[in-house]
Image (cartoon, rainbow, N blue to C red):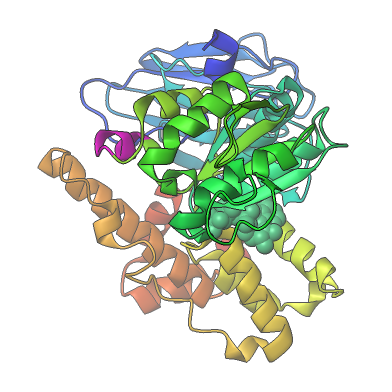
């Protein structure tokens, strides 16, 4: 894989866990300095348009002294220096925040990403789109995805889309097809998990008349039917081991043989495969061929889970309402606030179901979503038994704090005094916790207390 494509596949979040001194760098993803990167040395690093800053950003929306990063071996703390347009993390304006590897910070319209210094990730310019095909999103994670999709679609190679259920893998595949030179050709969907094993080979490769009982006529398989277009292999991890060499041959030589036939036929098609399981793990467990995995994973696209881009919720909800022929006001602010704190294990599909239920049956039919539910982002989910005890404990507490605070501030209508009373903690301690998690909204307490 060349360096360009190597950079393309690095869209997964960087794990929080770390050992040894923290060494990070800052990638500039948008704005006039897009493409630059800066290593963060221990000490104080100032960012702004002033020439006295350590990192000078020339965009008009950035203040002269905009943001300060306090870098130590253990952590990086970002402090907004009273900038005019503010600094944001995951769509929330903050004054002070501990910055984790993988985090994106937005200064006005400039997006910066913090990654480990040894990361091979290079600044990937952010797409300016707010949608790609039927995919909707304006978060940094989605704009990164759109950049990858734009390049991948134009490139013409086979693609692996790997992501959790409901994150839009099929929409990615469709968009890749629609934005490619093959858009005029067919888009053939094969749901591998839904085909009985006995019919799988014929479904993919076709059969000749009389090849098996019931094969009354000759039939072209999915690869042949996709001639000039794209085949979408959904849940490719479910492909039986004995058929995997045949898929590999189709990918490598563009040749398929119908069941019962003697000769191979050459096909002109592109394959986009999707999986919600970790195929690398399937390889280790002997359920998926290593050579096939490597062939498929040359170009990998990773749609992010919804919980990592909650700032897209309003946009997604409005797009869903529009499709239902309803205005944005069809869903109350109160319900929107509740939806914003839910971690969405079923991702956008689950969101769509909830929005449809609210519209068709009424918002009062929605299940309670205000408590940090054990099934959603459970402590077990945050538990990494391979971490040192102290780090594992800290991580668990962080997840709990974040979930608890999200529920609390929504329940108390963002009124800090009320929230402190309900939680039974001092206002000043609550403020500190909110700041730590980047939830402090500027002036929200004084205006409402
Ligand atoms: N970014 C998005 N913008 C708008 N709608 C989306 C987005 N992502 C997913 N959806 C919607 O969510 C639903 C599920 O999408 P899709 O079938 O593409 O997900 P998937 O990852 O292929 O799911 P699965 O793994 O279950 O097959 C669809 O209704 C789709 O329209």
Decide if residue 138 is on the left or right side of residue 329.
Answer: left
Q: Residue at x 32, y 22 (%)?
A: 72
Quarter of the render that holds ligand 1: bottom right
Of the 4 image quadrants, the one containing the C terminus is bottom right
The one of 77 and 361 positioned closer to us in this rendering: 361
Query: In this rendering, would 86 be left or right of 241?
Result: right
Q: Where does residue 190 sit, x and y in percent of width and height?
A: 61, 50
User: Does the magenta stretch mainly form a helix, a strand or a loop?
Assistant: helix
Q: Residue at x 39, y 70 (%)?
A: 372
Furthest-front residue in this view: 210
The answer to whether 55 is drawn above or below residue 233 in the figure is above
For image coordinates 65% across by 44% down, the residue present is 221
Quadrant position of residue 180? top right
Give the x, y percent position of residue 168.
Answer: 62, 51
Figure quadrant of residue 286: top left
- Magenta span: 280-286
Q: Residue 99, position in %: x, y?
A: 43, 35
Q: Is residue 240 magenta?
A: no
Please say if 129 is above or below 24. below
In the rendered view, tell whether residue 246 sits above or below residue 298.
below
Q: Quadrant of residue 245?
A: top left
Q: Is residue 282 magenta?
A: yes
Q: Nearer the viewer, residue 373 or 76?
A: 373
Would residue 424 be found to the left or right of residue 88 on screen?
left
């Amino acid at each position: 894989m060349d360096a360009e494509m190597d950079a393309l596949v690095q869209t997964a979040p960087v794990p929080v866990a770390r050992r040894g001194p923290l060494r990070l760098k800052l990638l500039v993803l948008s704005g006039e300095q897009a493409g630059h990167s800066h290593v963060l040395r221990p000490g104080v690093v100032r960012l702004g348009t002033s020439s006295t800053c350590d990192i000078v950003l020339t965009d008009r929306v950035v203040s002269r002294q905009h943001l300060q990063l306090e870098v130590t071996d253990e952590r990086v703390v970002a402090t907004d220096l009273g900038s005019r347009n503010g600094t944001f993390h995951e769509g929330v304006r903050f004054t002070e925040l501990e910055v984790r590897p993988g985090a994106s910070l937005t200064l006005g319209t400039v997006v910066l990403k913090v990654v480990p210094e040894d990361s091979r990730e290079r600044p990937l310019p952010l797409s300016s789109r707010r949608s790609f095909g039927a995919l909707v999103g304006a978060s940094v994670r989605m704009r990164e995805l759109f950049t990858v999709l734009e390049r991948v679609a134009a490139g013409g190679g086979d693609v692996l889309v790997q992501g959790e259920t409901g994150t839009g893998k099929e929409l990615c595949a469709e968009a890749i097809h629609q934005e490619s030179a093959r858009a005029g050709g067919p888009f053939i969907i094969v749901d591998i998990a839904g085909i009985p094993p006995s019919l799988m080979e014929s479904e993919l490769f076709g059969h000749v008349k009389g090849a098996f009982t019931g094969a009354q006529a000759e039939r072209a398989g999915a690869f042949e039917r996709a001639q000039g277009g794209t085949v979408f292999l959904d849940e490719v991890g479910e492909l039986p081991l004995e058929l995997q060499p045949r898929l590999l041959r189709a990918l490598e030589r563009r040749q398929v043989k119908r069941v019962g036939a003697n000769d191979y036929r050459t096909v002109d098609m592109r394959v986009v495969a999707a999986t919600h399981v970790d195929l690398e793990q399937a390889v280790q467990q002997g359920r998926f061929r290593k050579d096939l995995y490597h062939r498929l994973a040359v170009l990998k696209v990773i749609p992010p889970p919804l919980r990592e881009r909650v700032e897209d919720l309003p946009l997604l909800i409005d797009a869903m309402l529009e499709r239902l022929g309803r205005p944005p006001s069809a869903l109350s602010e109160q319900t929107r606030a509740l939806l914003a704190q839910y971690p969405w294990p079923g991702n956008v599909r689950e969101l769509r179901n909830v929005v449809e239920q609210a519209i068709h049956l009424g918002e009062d039919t929605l299940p309670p979503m205000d408590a940090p539910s054990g099934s959603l982002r459970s402590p077990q989910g945050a538990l990494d038994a391979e971490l040192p005890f102290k780090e594992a404990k800290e991580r668990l507490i962080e997840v709990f704090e974040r979930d608890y605070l999200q529920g609390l501030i929504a329940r108390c209508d963002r009124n800090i005094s009320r929230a402190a009373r309900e939680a039974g903690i001092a206002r000043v301690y609550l403020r500190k916790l909110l700041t730590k998690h980047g939830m402090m909204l500027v002036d929200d307490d004084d205006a409402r207390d």
